[in-house]
Image: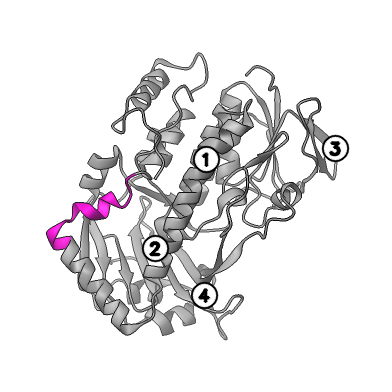
Amino acid sequence: MAGLERAIVIGGGIGGLTAAAALHRRGVRVTVLERAASLEPVGAAISLSPNALRALDVIGIGDDVRALAAWQGDGGLRAPGGRWLARTSAAAAAERFGGPLVLLHRATLIGHLAARLPAGAVRTGTAARLLDPGAPDRPARVGTPAGDLEADLVVAADGIHSAVRRELFPSHPGPVYSGFTTWRLVIPVPGVEFASHETWGRGRIWGTHPLRDGRVYAYAAAPAPAGERAPDDERAELLRLYGDWHTPVPEVLAAARPGDVLRHDVHHIAVPLPAFHRGRVALAGDAAHAMPPTLGQGGNQAIEDAITLAHHAADLPAYTAARLPRTTAIARRAVRAARLNMGTGPMATVVRDSALIALSRTAPALFLRGFDGIADWRPPAGAARPGGSAEEAGRMLAADHGRRGPEENTP
């Protein structure tokens, strides 16, 4: 890549490692600086939709991840008593958006991404801070305990509470509390069969999904004051909130131990940043556009960022132009979805559920249309590295002449 020889990635999560792999594939010497002692992610599973899988095709792991898809049957939305509010078809979604939805453990994806980097490219246990964002006539500079580093590009993928974002845009208000908290767990639940589903109650959500390795991924969300924690343990809190919901919710909770349950308050960036770059520094993932998880797009958008950034690494204004409008629109849709999901009014819940049932019966395709402009995104034409394989060239040609045509894939 002309004019770009050295890049530093701050943050060894999914977005940071994808960016590092994409830059490395284009011939850039990359160093990843991760504060944690290992790349073992904080979190449970991640859902990758076709847009992210096409992005992963660019770095050569899309098909490996697709092979991990576990559930190919029907699923949908349920009420706490078990009634189906809406049914969804994995086959119909794959046909509409050009691929499956894949649920996998975050550690599995991290392993695939790290394997795309050369030995020594990732430095764990290394705190980093931005000293100088750089300019056209000077490199960016990053401080570490072992000394300062210079780079032609710095990718800041340091999460929702990004220190780099605060350095670049000190007047930006930063993330705000979304008003609800989430619980997640990945455990074996022997002897229980179920259809992949999400259940909507009055101000509460539960989801249960099978993983390829035989374990079950479950998550829940409910309004709560910021920082609140259970008086005993989070498994007990889940039993209080969801213990009388339909199968397999009680069975999952019976199989769980208190230490299996992760709880995190949800924050998002309500005021969009003025840009995703400054100088030679680019923001990616939650550092740029943290959003509620209600559309399942947080990690997917970080992967899109990474591939697009590698493509526009020598022209960061083009990266901002490609990503800021799209992620802003998706983040706003996620906030609206959270308001619908987390509504606590009894009449509003009845109206919502009745509308879902009617819509599912009369126009089931409308549920899939809600992801038009999201799941059908394709990487920039030419995003595969120059001189790549014939398979890469074929994928990029298909992307350039995809089902959405030449127009921009913004929502």
* Amino acid, disc 4: Pro
Residue 4 sits in quarter:
top right
Residue that extends furthest to the right in the rendered view of this protein: 147
Secondary structure at numbered mark 2? helix
SS state under label 4: helix
Where is residue 408 drawn, in percent x and y? 40, 34
Between the residue at mark 2 and the residue at mark 1, the CA separation in whole angstroms equals 21 Å
Lower position in the chain sequence, tag 3 or tag 2: 3
The span from disc 3 to disc 1 (Cα, nearest Å) is 30 Å
Provide the residue designation for mark 4: 258
**Nearest to viewer (mark 3 / mark 4):** 3
CA gap between label 1 and label 4 equals 39 Å
**Circle nearer the viewer, 3 or 2:** 2
Mark positioned earlier in the residue sequence (3 or 4): 3
Reading the image, the residue beneath label 3 is 148
Give the magenta part as a residue range: 360-372
Distance from disc 3 to disc 4, alpha carbons, whole Å, reads 42 Å
Q: Which residue is mark 1?
A: 323
**What is the three-letter code of the residue carrying label 2?**
Ala
Q: For mark 2, what is the residue?
A: 337
Q: Are marks 3 and 1 in contact (CB under 8 Å)?
A: no
Q: How far across and how far down the image is residue 248, in percent?
A: 30, 71
Foreground mark, 3 or 1? 1
Q: How busy is the neighbourhood of tag 3: few (under 14 within 10 Å), some, or many (20 plus)?
A: few
Quick one: label 4, few (<14), some, or many (20+) residues within 10 Å?
some
